[in-house]
Amino acid sequence: MQSLRGLWAIVRKDLALERRSQEAVSSMFIFGLLVILVFSFSLDLRAESAVQAAPGVLWVAFTFAGMLGLSRSFIRERDQGCLDGLLLCPVDRSVIYFGKLVSNLVFMFVCEAIILPLFVALFNLPFRPALLAVVVLGTLGFAAVGTLFSALTVHTRAREVMLPVLLFPVVMPVIIAAVRLTAGLLDGSPWAEIMQWMRLLVGFDVIFLALCYMCFEYVVEE
Amino acid sequence: MRLRRIIPGHLLTIVSALFMAVALVFTFLIAPREAVMGDVQRIFYFHVAAAWTGYLALVVAFLASVLCLTRGPGRWDGLALSSVEIGLVFVTEGIVSGSIWAKAAWGVWWTWDPRLTTSAVLWLIYASYLTLRKAVQEESRRARIAAVYAVMGFAAVPINFMAIRWWRTVHPVVLESSGLHLGPTMLATLVLSVVAFTLLYFTLLRLRLRLQDAGDRIESLMRCPGGVS
């Protein structure tokens, strides 16, 4: 119970900060939207090719926007000296990890909730409810590793550059699976065909959540 | 890792040089000329050996990183760093030799085949490891942060391979690495090459660890001049 209260306290803190300044969500959302627009312009505007590239564009937008939010997540803590305060709390280190993960997820979901309908409208795509499951699982995998790496890079020089450099190779399976699933769902492919990607996505999420949870305390300890 | 004490240094270097010489002789003179591709096929002996040694180095780096996290930095951090540096060189050699062979055998320098894509991702992960080490300012943290990244990176590789293998089998794969039927001489040459490269890895590792030790001693002397810390 202590852990859950600690977790909730961290989440509430981040949400309260965000509600007042709205830095993270607004910049993430605008950046995501910009990515989609830039891709729409730079790729051929003929209907068929645009639709073919659409799933990739969506996930590029999500990951780039997500990157913004993730990098800010721990940088803000460190710059204000909050990280030391968090470490002093009488809770397990993993609570900090999960608290941060949940707040990162909330920010990403809020952005995605706005970007996804726009995306569906812009590219004239059929909406499938299963898409939501894909977005949730993909974001979960991305944020799980991203939260850990955000804590990792907070002690480095050029931290904004380090996070994408470190994160992208490791979360590539998530991006591949998410794009394949999105494409499959939008094309109306039978479940049997894309089931393997769902398995990969879930497997990745489970494995890396566990791994990141284990590694987190090594990263933040003095 | 008291490698220096397990095998006397010069002995390792000499044996390694010997094996490399023998492997070279076998590769260029004794192994038969391949029927289909001709002499270009001889790259295969170095390509496989380099790739295998690269993976070995990265396994060593992973194990050293795990030990670094659980037992404390100490020598394990030095071992992890050395192994990643050397491993990166071997992986690069593997990729480059593979690319040359691909151009000769398939007509293209590169293809987004599962094995190659995984290799590219692997290369990126370990190059990032080195960049990360440079970027961490606080020495006390550097070992741990690098170790965590090495562990995560290593875990990502098999998953990556699976993802890419599924991805690429959706579309027909035109170019695939064919199963090679090796005659006894070719097999012997391959084994010799692999052994030679592995010995080379250990030789380089030993030298690099010695360099690391010297660097550490200099640093500790700089921190408290005139005495051992």
Image (cartoon, coloured by chain):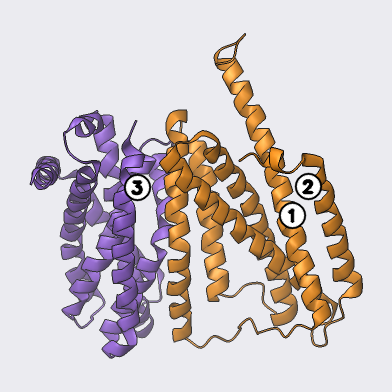
Residue that label 1 marks: B199
The purple chain is A
Identify the image quadrant of the C terminus of chain A.
top left
Q: Are marks 2 and 3 in contact (CB under 8 Å)?
A: no
Q: Can you say whether B62 is above or below B140 in the image?
A: below
Q: Is residue B202 left or right of residue B171?
A: right
**Image x and y of residue A35, in percent:** 32, 61
- Looking at the image, tell me whether mark 1 or mark 2 is earlier in sequence order: 2
**Image x and y of residue A142, in percent:** 31, 59
Identify which residue is drawn at 55% across, 50% down.
Answer: B61
Q: CA distance from mark 1 to mark 2?
A: 8 Å
How crowded pointer 1 is (Cα within 10 Å; few <14, some 14-19, many 20+) is rated as many
Q: Nearer the viewer, residue B72 or A145?
A: B72
**Circle 2 SS class:** helix
Residue that label 2 marks: B12
Q: Nearer the viewer, residue A123 or A165?
A: A165
**Image x and y of residue A144, in percent:** 29, 55
Chain B takes which shade in the image?
A: orange
